[in-house]
Image (cartoon, rainbow, N blue to C red):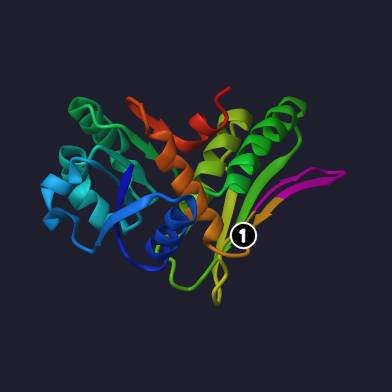
């Protein structure tokens, strides 16, 4: 298996290091994936950690040219149906996630259970607080939006969400449920971006023999 990294910033460098740790070949990196050699691309999985505008401009290039694609870029949910439809039409496997951290995906599963039961009980107001480094462009984070969607589905309420951009924080997400007599909170804190990179590499390995478009957590929790 060979991998090409689209977006060679901080996350791109970490993905490259995580690939090396797993013994997976990195066949190239690119800040302009549209100009990447197409003959090389057809035998490679592309890992995309760019920015929303770049992914929006290039998702058809990814689907047209690569063996499979792992997307870590967020901020394109409004065109999700269009993107998924294009990948499916091209027969190019794609895995996407707002956060590839194993811990965050377990947090999401926990939030699903908690919001389901508290929604059934009634009397609780959900909220989300997320904190990231000052370089992060989107707010709320894609992870916060995904967690909010889980809560809303189970409680029928949209959580009030607050965002902070401070220093070099890798990422902290807290989902809280405030009642009249108690409060329940679930928090995940990333110590570094390494966990995101390791999860993305796990997703790369999952593309072997995969068909269709899948969210990472769907495959991660598949029995």
Percent across and percent down for residue 60 are 17, 42
Q: Quadrant location of residue 112?
A: top right
Furthest residue to the right?
181
Q: Is residue 121 left or right of residue 147?
A: right
Magenta residues, dominant SS class: strand
Front residue of this view, candidates 152 and 87: 87
Percent across and percent down for residue 126 are 67, 44
Percent across and percent down for residue 216 are 47, 37
Residue position marked by numbered label 1 in the rendering: 190
Q: Is residue 166 above or below residue 140?
A: below
Front residue of this view, candidates 78 and 107: 107
- Residue span colored magenta: 174-186
Q: Quadrant of the N terminus?
A: top left
Indicate the secondary structure of the residue bearing disc 1. Answer: loop
Front residue of this view, candidates 51 and 100: 100
Residue 107 shows in the view:
yes
Percent across and percent down for residue 159 are 59, 45
Furthest residue to the front?
23
Furthest residue to the bottom?
167
Residue visible at 31% across and 41% down? 69
Residue visible at 57% across and 69% down? 169
Q: Quadrant location of residue 190?
A: bottom right
Is 181 magenta? The answer is yes
Instruction: Tally the numbered discs.
Output: 1
Residue 74 shows in the view:
no
Q: Is residue 110 above or below residue 25?
A: above
Q: Tell me the crowding category of disc 1: few under 14, some 14 to 19, or many 20 or more residues within 10 angstroms, Cα based.
A: some
Q: Is residue 15 above or below residue 135?
A: above
Q: Is residue 187 left or right of residue 87?
A: right
Is 113 magenta? The answer is no
């Amino acid at each position: 298996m060979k991998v090409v990294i689209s977006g060679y910033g901080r996350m791109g460098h970490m993905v490259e290091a995580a690939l090396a740790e797993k013994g997976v070949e990195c066949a190239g990196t690119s800040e302009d994936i549209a100009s990447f050699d197409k003959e090389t691309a057809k035998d490679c999985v592309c890992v995309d950690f760019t920015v929303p505008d770049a992914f929006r401009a290039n998702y058809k290039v990814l689907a047209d040219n690569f063996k499979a694609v792992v997307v870590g870029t967020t901020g394109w949910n409004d065109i999700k149906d269009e993107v998924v439809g294009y990948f499916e039409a091209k027969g190019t496997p794609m895995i996407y996630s707002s956060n590839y951290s194993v811990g965050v995906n377990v947090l999401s599963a926990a939030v699903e259970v908690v919001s389901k039961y508290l929604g059934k009980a009634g009397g609780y107001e959900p909220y989300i607080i997320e904190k990231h480094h000052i370089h992060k462009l989107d707010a709320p984070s894609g992870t916060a939006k995904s967690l909010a969607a889980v809560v809303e589905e189970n409680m029928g309420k949209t959580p009030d969400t607050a965002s902070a951009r401070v220093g070099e924080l890798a990422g902290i997400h807290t989902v809280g449920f405030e009642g009249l007599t108690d409060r329940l909170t679930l928090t995940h804190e990333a110590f570094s971006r390494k966990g995101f990179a390791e999860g993305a590499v796990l997703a790369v390995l999952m593309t072997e023999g995969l068909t269709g478009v899948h969210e990472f957590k769907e495959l991660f929790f598949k029995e």
